[in-house]
Image (tube, rainbow, N blue to C red):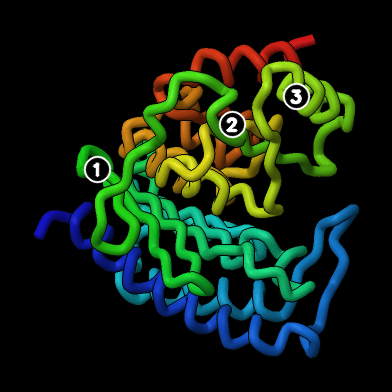
Amino acid sequence: MTDLAARYTAARRIAAEAGNMALDYFQKWEALTIDVKGHQDFVSEADKNVELAVRAALAQAFPEDGIVGEEGAPTPGTSGYTWVIDPIDGTTNFINGIPQWCVIIACVHQGQTVIGVVHDPVHDELHHAMLGGGAFCNDRPIHCSAKTSLREGSLGVGFSGRTHIEGIKRLVSLSCDAGTVFWRNGSGGLSLAYVATGRILGYVEEHMNAWDFLAGHLIVAEAGGRVEPVNADEAIARGGRVVVAGAGVFDAVEGLAKAAYDV
């Protein structure tokens, strides 16, 4: 087994284990201890403990790899591989008992995302891809929508307090004018997985952190979609804008993003 294939196998296993751990917390969500990091930015004991478990599993399997996570300090590595993890994406949903959240694990090598896993344990859906190997939900190959009009489905949109509210207001207005249904579920990572499965046409967010989008970015690309290019190393340092969609509507979706944000 190659180095990459071994990491791909481990990433799926670790994401599944982390999902089971997070699901145990979710089933007792009313008793969670919550801290407030900022506007609409929360962290629970579940986030912290699941990330610790993921970090420990990765460090045991690949001790020379770097690790970057949402909740903990970065761990430098020497192998050239860096893991980028979000233990629970969609924490606001999670702490309020809404079953729209996921565990995200990505692996980056030489500025490129080479492994992506987005696990939804509530619905037992493990979305995953390895660079050049196609995209899957559990064992089933997945593909982005082949639709060619924004009027034929929904467009996922996201917003965070890191950006000015005017951009998302313009995007929603433009989406309505384009005849599509704007859709937000509170988990950007899960939304990207939904683009890859063809459930929604595309997804746009002005700024996402690397742990939120690198895995889904790869899964969409491997599912036949198009993505606005990013350098994974730069995304780890600064985050970035995310625009992804099925090939038939990508130009239209990117046009909406540019009109909303490039002003």
Q: Residues within 10 Å of mark 3 (few under 14, many from 20)?
A: few
Q: Is residue 259 left or right of residue 119?
A: right
Q: Is residue 110 left or right of residue 75?
A: left
Q: Amino acid at mark 3?
A: Cys
- Residue 169's place in the image compared with 190, above or below, is above
Q: Do the numbered discs 2 and 1 sit on residues whose CB atoms are within 8 Å?
A: no
- 111, 15: nearer the viewer: 15
Q: Name which residue lies at 64% across and 69% down.
A: 99
Q: Earlier in the sequence, mark 2 or mark 3?
A: 3
Q: Earlier in the sequence, mark 3 or mark 1?
A: 1
Which of the 4 image quarters holds residue 153? top right
Label 3 element class? helix
Which of the 4 image quarters holds residue 139? bottom left
Q: Residues within 10 Å of mark 2 (few under 14, many from 20)?
A: many
Give the Cα separation between the discs numbered 2 and 1.
Answer: 20 Å
Give the residue pinned by disc 1: 134
Q: Residues within 10 Å of mark 1 (few under 14, many from 20)?
A: some
In x, y percent, where is residue 213? 54, 44
Q: Amino acid at mark 2?
A: Val
Label 2 element class? strand
- 83, 263: nearer the viewer: 263
Give the Cα separation between the discs numbered 3 and 1.
Answer: 33 Å
Q: Name which residue lies at 31% across and 63% down.
A: 138
Q: Name which residue lies at 53% across and 74% down.
A: 122
In x, y percent, where is residue 82? 41, 51
Q: Nearer the viewer, mark 3 or mark 1?
A: 3
Residue 111 seen by the camera: no
Give the residue pinned by disc 3: 176
Give the Cα separation between the discs numbered 2 and 3.
Answer: 20 Å
Give the residue pinned by disc 2: 242
